[in-house]
Image (cartoon, helix red, strand yellow):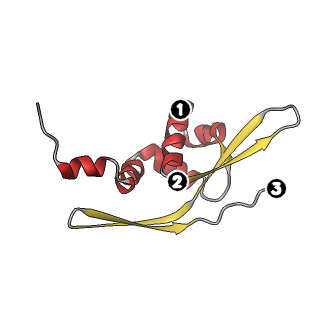
Amino acid sequence: MIKKSKVLFANKYDISQKILKELANFESRHILFATMKHHKSLQDISREEKIPLSSVYKRINSLKDCSLIHEKIDFAENGHVTRFYQSKIKDIEISITKFEPKITFTKNKLEKND
């Protein structure tokens, strides 16, 4: 049986590690940049960024888990629920010193609800 290092095990649950992993993902970065100025639906993101809808769903859930994206819910008169997403971050600076990542965010100005 292989024994895991305590350092690796502790980092598994570190939010910084999750954020770094999410930012390393090409599709996640495209979604964050595509939603920086305005809220967009999953279908709009998929169509504009040419990312399969299933991948957009997966990436949006990961971005929400890391609190990197804002979700806005609208209710149509016919009872349908539509969800829109906007990036919570405008800029990111990452530095790593002695195995510890430091992530600094510039907060994005979210679009006002209508």
Callout 2: helix, strand or loop? loop
Residue 4 drawn at (x, y percent): 16, 42
Q: Check the picture and name the quadrant holding the N terminus.
A: top left
- For label 2, the residue is 67
Camera-side mark, 2 or 3: 2
- For label 1, the residue is 52
- Indicate the amino acid at tag 2: Ser
Distance (Cα) linking label 1 and label 3:
29 Å
Disc on the earlier residue, 2 or 3:
2
> Between residues 51 and 86, which one lies in front from this camera angle?
86
Disc on the earlier residue, 2 or 1:
1
Distance (Cα) linking label 2 and label 1:
22 Å
Residue 34 vertical position relative to residue 107 in the rendered view, above or below: above
- For label 3, the residue is 114
Residue 39 drawn at (x, y percent): 68, 51
Distance (Cα) linking label 2 and label 3:
23 Å
Farthest residue toward the right?
A: 77
Camera-side mark, 1 or 3: 3
Tell me which residue sits at (49%, 66%) in the image.
91
Answer with left or right where residue 95 lies relative to residue 44: left
Callout 1: helix, strand or loop? loop
- Indicate the amino acid at tag 3: Asp
